[in-house]
Amino acid sequence: MISGFDFDVLWRSLPYLFRDGMSFTLMLTALSALGGLVLGTLLALMRLSNMKVLGAIATGYVNLMRSLPLVLVIFWFYFLVPYLGQIITGSERPMVVGAFSSALITFTLFEAAYFSEIMRAGIQSIPKGQVSAGYALGLTYRQVTSYIVLPQALRNMLPVILTQTIVLFQDTSLVYVLSITDFLGAASKVAQRDGRLIEMYLFAALVYFVISFAASRLVRALQAKTAIIR
């Protein structure tokens, strides 16, 4: 098998795979993680709010997203959002939503459900005495949340947030169903074009493994460091 392995096709395809494919994968991962973290934090605050309506809405959203397969959500947003836009704007034709915009919206909304649970655990890990002390100093709810609760919650949950980001990085390969040229999509196109499926898919798996394994080791080191600080 090794004797028939075509290393030249890998070498020739590296610029395309990493310049077009991997750059898109990393960009989608970063933007989705950032958007999901912001939205997830808001959902976590809603779930912890004293207003039952907000808590019910956030709980329903989180449970819904976590109960659906990601690939189904990708299809759902890609085909449904244009028609929702048509209804909202009252236009005669469905709204034009690009594949990238659809993928970014999908991953942001989907990952927000998971980041919400992570942030909720982080917020609940903060001692209530610190919150009470903040109120005793005359701080408002917004100030206590912004200056006392969220910074510590983010620090406590940072290893878990990064771990979820690694999962997100792996999940971005599902955008191939929208014919988007991410890293796996680029490898698939080269494999189909040159008829070298074994080489390209093995190489893609190796790249995903190396990046994910290296990132997980960094997360473990960060987790050990924060544990020592505590």
Image (cartoon, grey):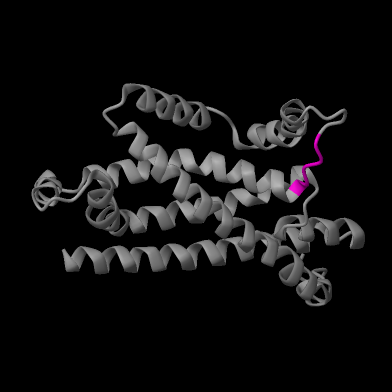
- Residue at 40% x, 68% y is 218
Direction from residue 209 to residue 223 in the image, left or right: left
Q: Main secondary structure of the magenta part?
A: loop
Q: Which residues are magenta?
A: 95-99
User: Which quadrant of the view contains residue 19?
Assistant: bottom right
Direction front: furthest residue = 138
Q: Position of residue 166 (x, y in %)?
A: 50, 56
Direction from residue 70 to residue 120 in the image, left or right: left
Q: Position of residue 182 (x, y in %)?
A: 72, 57
| Residue 104 seen by the camera | yes
Judge by depth and name the residue closer to the eye, 193 or 2: 193
Q: Quadrant of the C terminus?
A: bottom left
Residue 54 in the image: above or below residue 182: above
Q: Position of residue 109 (x, y in %)?
A: 55, 40
- Residue at 28% x, 52% y is 153
Residue 96 in the image: above or below residue 228: above
User: Which quadrant of the view contains residue 229?
Assistant: bottom left
Judge by depth and name the residue closer to the eye, 40 or 5: 40
